[in-house]
Image: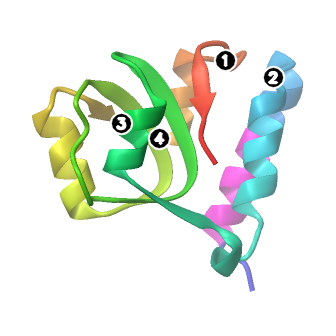
Amino acid sequence: MTNQIVIRMAKDLKRASVKNDAPIWAKLSEYILKPSVARRDINLYRIGQLTKENETVVFPGKVLGTGNIPHKITLCSFSISNSAATKIIENGGRIISYLELIENNPTGKGVKLLG
């Protein structure tokens, strides 16, 4: 059974995709409806390798706190560990919700999808 919050998130993402002609939000909507077993995990070390300074990143899974991130990023993920969140914020980065992400980047331009 799917959580009502997850269903709401999927609907919001799908609506944003259609409204803004942004396929990235439709892709995220598909990811959110997958079973939690099928979702991936990523650690900060790997995010640091895949990103650059001040990038906006979305990860459809759980972000773990292993390693450090050498630069500032803005991150949106479905789940994040406390240690990962602390490390990102201490390094000058931000963690935002999917609604903030859509509001700041309606067309999805400048958003890097990991995973």
Q: Is residue 109 above or below residue 35?
A: above
Which element type, helix, strand or loop, lies under badge 1? loop
Badge 4 crowding class, 10 Å Cα cut-off, few under 14, some 14 to 19, many 20 or more, is: many
Residue farthest left in this picture: 90
Precedes in sequence: disc 2 or disc 3: 2
Q: Nearer the viewer, mark 2 or mark 3?
A: 3
Magenta-tinted stretch: 4-13
> Amino acid type of disc 4?
Cys
Which element type, helix, strand or loop, lies under badge 3? helix
- Front-most of 79 and 64? 64
The quarter holding residue 111 reads: top right
CB contact under 8 Å: marks 1 and 2: yes
Task: Specify whether residue 55 is painted magenta.
Answer: no
Q: Is residue 102 visible?
A: no
Residue at 54%, 38% (x, y): give it.
58
What is the magenta segment's predominant secondary structure? helix
Precedes in sequence: disc 1 or disc 4: 4
What label sits on residue 22 in the rendered view? 2
Residue at 56%, 21% (x, y): give it.
103
Precedes in sequence: disc 3 or disc 1: 3
Residue 98 coordinates in the image, percent (x, y): 54, 40
Task: Specify whether residue 5 is painted magenta.
Answer: yes
Which element type, helix, strand or loop, lies under badge 4? strand
Inter-mark Cα distance, 2 to 3? 26 Å
Residue designated by label 4: 76
Residue designated by label 3: 48
Badge 3 crowding class, 10 Å Cα cut-off, few under 14, some 14 to 19, many 20 or more, is: some
Residue farthest front in this picture: 49
Q: Nearer the viewer, mark 3 or mark 1?
A: 3
